[in-house]
């Protein structure tokens, strides 16, 4: 049997779960770095039919420093529905 689980803080798990032989491997996955966040925003903006190069993805990545990939996706989706649908700009590329 193969089991995959996630936890935000494994120190809060009961010790019997972490006992030797219960879990063979524990992996740590960090938050995406700035380059990865740029890519995440670009993907989700493009999925909505917009030209990702028209946006300052670097600025978006900078202000989303503590975001997970999922949170970045949610934010870009939420911004899309409130900004793009009303023809307002969102982090336009000024360079």
Image (cartoon, rainbow, N blue to C red):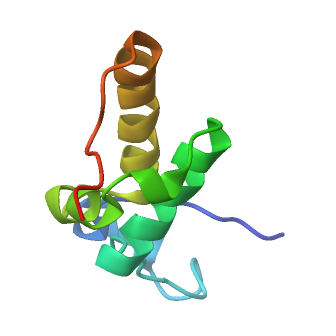
On screen, residue 75 above or below 12: above
Left or right of residue 43, residue 87 in this image: left
Q: Measuring 37% from the left and 72% from the top, which residue is drawn there?
A: 32
Question: What percent of the width, then of the height, locates residue 69?
Answer: 44, 58
Left or right, residue 2 beside residue 77: right
Residue 33 in sight from this viewpoint: no
Front position in the image: 5 or 19: 5
Tell me if residue 17 can be seen: yes
The answer to whether 52 is drawn above or below residue 39 in the figure is above
Q: Nearer the viewer, residue 32 or 25?
A: 32
The total of numbered circles placed on residues is 0
The relative height of residue 75 versus residue 39 in the rendered view (above or below) is above
Which is more toward the observer, 94 or 24? 94
Q: Residue 2 location, x and y as percent?
A: 78, 70
Q: Residue furthest top?
A: 86
The quadrant of the picture occupied by the N terminus is bottom right
Q: Residue at x 46, y 14 (%)?
A: 85
Q: Quadrant of residue 13?
A: bottom left
Give percent across and percent down for residue 82: 36, 16
Asked if 35 appears above or below 77 in the picture, the reply is below
Q: Residue at x 37, y 46 (%)?
A: 71
Q: Residue lying farthest right?
A: 1
Residue 40 locus on image (x, y percent): 49, 60
Identify the residue at the far front of this view. 95
**Which residue is found at the position 24% from the left and 65% from the top?**
95
């Amino acid at each position: 049997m193969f089991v995959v689980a996630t936890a935000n803080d494994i120190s809060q798990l009961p010790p019997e779960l972490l006992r030797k032989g219960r879990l063979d491997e524990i992996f740590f996955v960090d938050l995406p770095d700035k380059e990865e966040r740029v890519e995440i925003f670009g993907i989700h903006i493009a999925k909505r039919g917009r030209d990702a190069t028209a946006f300052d993805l670097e600025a978006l990545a900078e202000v989303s420093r503590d975001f997970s990939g999922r949170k970045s996706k949610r934010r870009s989706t939420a911004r899309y529905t409130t900004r793009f649908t009303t023809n307002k700009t969102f982090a336009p590329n000024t360079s």
